[in-house]
Structures are given as structure tokens and as C-alpha cells.
Image (cartoon, helix red, strand yellow):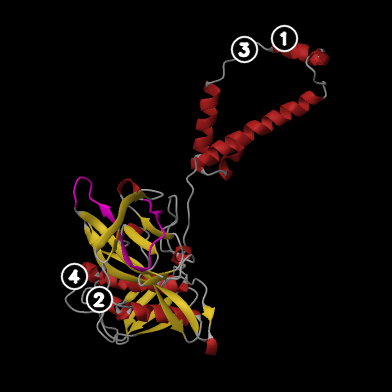
């Protein structure tokens, strides 16, 4: 291997040497000279022509080499790289990035149309991914949640999508629809009437605010409020690029948050709530049967508890297991079966082990048609 040392990654060299050493230690030498000479001089006794032996030896060398390469590859961590962030080693890509921010398609919901449907007069129906600050969990009392909100675009351009989503996020959850269970934990971070002028470039998004954020918010709430705009803008653009958030007069966005470029943190566990309901969306109308609820979670032992209520009466409850446990974020789904027409609230949460206290929850109200 010395001839190749300069062309191989040092970690790969170490794994190859360790693999070869381990296999070499398992070999017990035996005196096979006589058997080999016999095979060469009397090939008919072994059922193999002599001229095939060199080919067999070459094949053996190839198989052994391929096996070692496969072993080395299996010991190499698989990474998923996201533009603008460091590559992370995990079973699934960080949630809320690009593809996972495409609205679901199996039900008619606030996030039911991943591809806008052209309407009369060039107007387009679109589901905007919006992030908002709400009650968090444990040592992080405030975290980000996401909803898809149905809206109409006058023109379907990238800048118009980002501008529409950011301005919907600035308007706050009360502007999206009627008050729903779980919505009381939302943080109204922006002053009424705040608007944003948005510019979208290939490597950067600029968001210029007309007014600073609400006074009286904690430092954590202020920082997450800015992150909610960053995640909303990049989700709408389907690009994880830096986002410049500032005021037209250059003043701080909040008292403790200055203007400047912001990015999604590489450690998304610091900002995203550990339990999400991703489908059906809030204020959804569900026409499919059976009704299936889907979500994401980063919880202890991948445990997610849930409860379905109708008119404040519990009609079903249980628990499910996400595809992976924290620190990885997995997906989960619950089949509720056929439901009678009416308004339902599905609540999912991470329980504190051994206690009845809830660590974090997400509630979504939807209508079965």
C-alpha cells in the first residue's frame, strides 16, 4: 500500500490496514505444497483444466480486493450535505430543509398543493411554509414550529413567493385563520402593520422590514423571531442561503438583535421544536379516508404520544414511534381510520418519562368533509 499512500485518505488507510491485519490474524498457515503440485500435474483429478488456474487466481485476488473495499466503505460514515451548512452524519436530512418543506399531497389541506394550480387572470393558488415562535421544551422554552398556509399569488415568481411567505409570517398566526387549540402558545413577535420588501438572488435573500420587532420580548424570543423569517424565506425559496434581515433606516431589528446576514444553524435541534404535526395542516379540510396524520420528531427513544378530540371529547389516543430517536429527527404517522364528518383536533407531544408533564406539543385542528 505504500505506493498509494499519497493518494488515499489517512483515515481510509488506517481502516484498510486494520481490516487486513484482522483477517491476517485469522489465517492459519498449512503445508499445501504437495496438494498444489498434485493439482498442477494432474488437473483431471480436480475437474479443472490447468489453463484455468491462473484465471482462478486472478479472480480470487479481485474478489478479496473488492471485499476489502466494501468493508472499508461500510465503515465510512454516510453524510448528507446541505447547501450553506456543514455536512451532518445522520439517517435523515435535517427536517424543514428544501424537499421536506414541500406541502403534502394526500389531502386537501392548507398545505395540500405542492405545485401551484394556475387560475384565471394568472393568479395562482399556493401553500406557503411559515415558521413561527411558540412554547418550546426543557432548557429551550421557545422553539420554531411550521405551518403551511394557503394563499393566492398574483404572479408565480420566486421573489413573489418569498415576499408573500415572509409577509404572512410577519402578520402573525391570528391573521392566518381562526384561533385554534395550541395557537395560544404563539409569540406575536412583530408590530401590527409591519411589512417586508424582499429581494431574492442566487446566493442571498434580503428582507428589509418597515418596523422593528415588538418590545418586551426576551432575548431568546427575539433571536428566534429573526430565525423564523430566515427559515420562512429559505423554505419559500427552496434555497438554504444567507438572509439579510434589516430595517430601512439601519436600526436594530430588536433591542438585542442587530441587522445583518443570518443563516439556518447547522444544529437544527437548537431552533426546531421536537414534535411537529406536518399533515394535515392547520385549518385543513380532509377528504381522504382513512385519515392519516404524519409528523416529525426528535424525542427520547423516538416516543410520541397523541390524542384526538372532537368537541373537547377524546375520541382516540395512543402513542407511536418515530423512525429515529434524538439527536436524529425521524418521521412518524398515525392511521386514524375513517372519521365521521366534523371538526377534530389532533395533539402530539413528547412526554417527560415518569411524569405527566408534557415536554413539547403540537396541536392541529382540521375538518373532515
- On the image, numbered disc 1 is attached to which residue? 34
Specify whether 24 is left or right of 277: right
Q: Which of marks 1 and 4 is in front?
A: 4
Element at badge 2? loop
Q: In this view, does 253 lie above or below 218?
A: below
Residue 287 spot, x, y in % from top left: 45, 68
Residue 75 spot, x, y in % from top left: 49, 39
How far separated are the C-alphas under marks 4 and 2?
A: 10 Å
**Disc assigned to residue 218:** 4
Can residue 326 be seen in the rendering of this structure? no
How far separated are the C-alphas under marks 1 and 3?
A: 11 Å
Say few, some or many: other residues with alpha carbon within 10 Å of mark 2 (under 14 / 14 to 19 / 20 or more).
many
How far separated are the C-alphas under marks 1 and 2?
A: 86 Å
Q: In the picture, which quadrant includes the C terminus?
A: bottom left
At a point 42% along the width and 80% down the height, the residue shown is 151
Residue 227 spot, x, y in % from top left: 32, 70
Mark found first going from the N terminus, 3 or 4: 3
Mark found first going from the N terminus, 1 or 4: 1
Specify whether 359 is left or right of 262: left
Q: What stretch is highlighted in magenta?
A: 328-356
Q: In the picture, which quadrant includes the N terminus?
A: top right
Residue 289 quadrant: bottom left
- On the image, numbered disc 3 is attached to which residue? 30
Say few, some or many: other residues with alpha carbon within 10 Å of mark 1 (under 14 / 14 to 19 / 20 or more).
few
- On the image, numbered disc 2 is attached to which residue? 189
Amino acid at each position: 500500500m505504500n505506493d498509494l499512500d499519497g493518494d488515499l485518505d489517512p483515515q481510509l488507510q488506517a481502516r484498510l490496514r486494520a481490516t487486513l491485519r484482522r483477517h491476517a490474524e485469522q489465517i492459519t498457515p498449512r503445508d499445501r505444497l504437495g496438494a498444489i503440485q498434485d493439482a498442477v500435474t494432474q488437473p483431471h483429478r480436480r475437474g479443472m483444466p490447468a489453463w484455468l488456474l491462473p484465471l482462478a487466481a486472478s479472480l480470487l485476488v479481485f474478489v478479496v480486493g473488492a471485499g476489502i473495499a466494501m468493508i472499508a466503505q461500510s465503515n465510512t460514515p454516510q453524510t448528507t450535505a446541505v447547501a450553506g451548512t456543514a455536512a451532518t452524519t445522520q439517517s435523515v436530512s435535517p427536517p424543514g430543509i428544501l424537499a421536506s418543506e414541500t406541502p403534502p399531497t394526500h389531502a386537501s389541506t392548507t398545505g395540500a398543493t405542492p405545485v401551484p394550480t394556475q387560475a384565471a387572470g394568472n393568479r395562482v393558488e399556493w401553500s406557503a411554509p411559515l415558521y413561527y415562535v411558540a412554547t418550546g421544551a426543557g432548557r429551550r422554552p421557545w422553539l420554531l414550529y411550521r405551518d403551511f398556509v394557503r394563499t393566492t399569488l398574483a404572479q408565480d415568481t420566486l421573489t413573489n413567493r418569498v415576499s408573500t411567505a415572509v409577509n404572512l409570517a410577519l402578520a402573525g398566526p391570528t391573521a392566518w385563520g381562526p384561533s385554534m387549540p395550541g395557537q395560544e402558545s404563539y409569540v406575536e413577535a412583530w408590530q401590527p402593520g409591519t411589512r417586508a420588501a424582499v429581494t431574492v438572488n442566487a446566493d442571498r435573500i434580503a428582507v428589509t422590514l418597515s418596523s422593528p420587532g415588538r418590545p418586551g420580548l426576551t432575548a431568546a424570543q427575539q433571536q428566534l423571531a429573526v430565525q423564523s423569517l430566515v427559515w420562512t424565506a429559505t423554505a419559500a425559496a427552496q434555497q438554504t442561503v444567507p438572509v439579510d434581515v434589516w430595517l430601512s433606516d439601519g436600526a436594530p431589528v430588536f433591542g438585542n438583535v442587530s441587522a445583518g446576514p443570518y443563516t439556518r444553524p447547522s444544529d437544527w435541534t437548537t431552533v426546531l421544536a421536537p414534535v411537529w404535526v406536518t399533515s394535515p395542516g392547520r385549518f385543513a379540510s380532509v377528504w381522504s379516508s382513512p385519515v392519516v396524520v404524519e409528523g416529525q420528531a426528535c424525542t427520547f427513544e423516538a416516543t410520541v404520544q397523541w390524542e384526538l378530540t372532537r368537541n373537547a371529547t377524546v375520541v382516540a389516543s395512543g402513542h407511536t414511534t418515530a423512525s429515529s430517536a434524538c439527536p436524529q429527527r425521524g418521521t412518524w404517522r398515525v392511521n386514524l381510520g375513517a372519521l365521521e364528518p366534523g371538526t377534530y383536533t389532533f395533539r402530539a407531544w413528547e412526554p417527560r418519562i415518569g411524569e405527566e408533564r408534557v415536554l413539547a406539543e403540537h396541536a392541529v385542528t382540521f375538518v373532515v368533509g
